[in-house]
Image: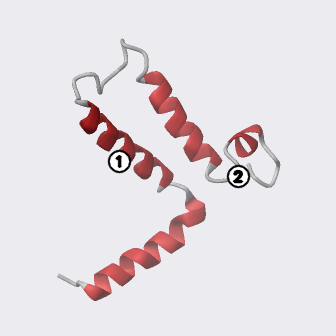
Amino acid sequence: LIETAHELALRYNDKSPLENMHCARLFEYVSNPKCNIFVSLSKSQYQEVRKICIDAILHTDNAHHFAMIKEVQMMYEVNPE
């Protein structure tokens, strides 16, 4: 998407455009009262869930896959238990 100057790449400044679109869509959908699966959460719980969702979605960007694998391997080497 970035190489072709796709609309999503332009909208999300070339940083994980597809994943950012997925995050935006998720929270767009749950802003509808009929679809809001987070309605019963307190404000602080919602903020935490939102952060977790965004982090989880952004971590699916394959452009960062090998850096994340290396980080996990280093953590395992430091603490192999």
Q: Tell me the residue that label 2 is attached to.
A: 14
Q: Residue 21's quadrant in the figure?
A: top right
Q: Residue 31 location, x and y as percent? A: 43, 21
Q: Residue 49 location, x and y as percent? A: 31, 41
Residue furthest to the left in view is 81
Residue furthest to the top in view is 34
| Residue at 44% across, 73% down | 69
In the drawing, what numbered circle is on residue 17?
A: none
Q: Tell me the residue that label 1 is attached to.
A: 52
Q: Residue 1 location, x and y as percent? A: 73, 49
Residue furthest to the front in view is 43
Q: Residue 60 location, x and y as percent? A: 49, 54
At numbered mark 1, what does the secondary structure look like: helix, strand or loop? helix
Image quadrant holding the C terminus, namely bottom left
Q: Which amino acid does label 2 sit on?
A: Asp
The answer to which of 31 and 69 lies nearer the viewer is: 31
Relative to residue 5, is residue 56 drawn left or right? left
Q: What residue type is labelled 1?
A: Ile
| Residue at 23% across, 30% down | 42
| Residue at 64% across, 53% down | 15
Of pointers 2 and 1, the one earlier in the residue sequence:
2
In the image, residue 10 sits, relative to residue 26, either above or below, namely below
What is the C-alpha distance between the residues marked 2 and 1?
22 Å
At numbered mark 2, what does the secondary structure look like: helix, strand or loop? loop
Relative to residue 53, is residue 66 drawn left or right? right
| Mark 1, other Cα within 10 Å: few <14 / some 14–19 / many ≥20 | few
| Mark 2, other Cα within 10 Å: few <14 / some 14–19 / many ≥20 | some
In the image, residue 69 sits, relative to residue 31, either above or below, namely below
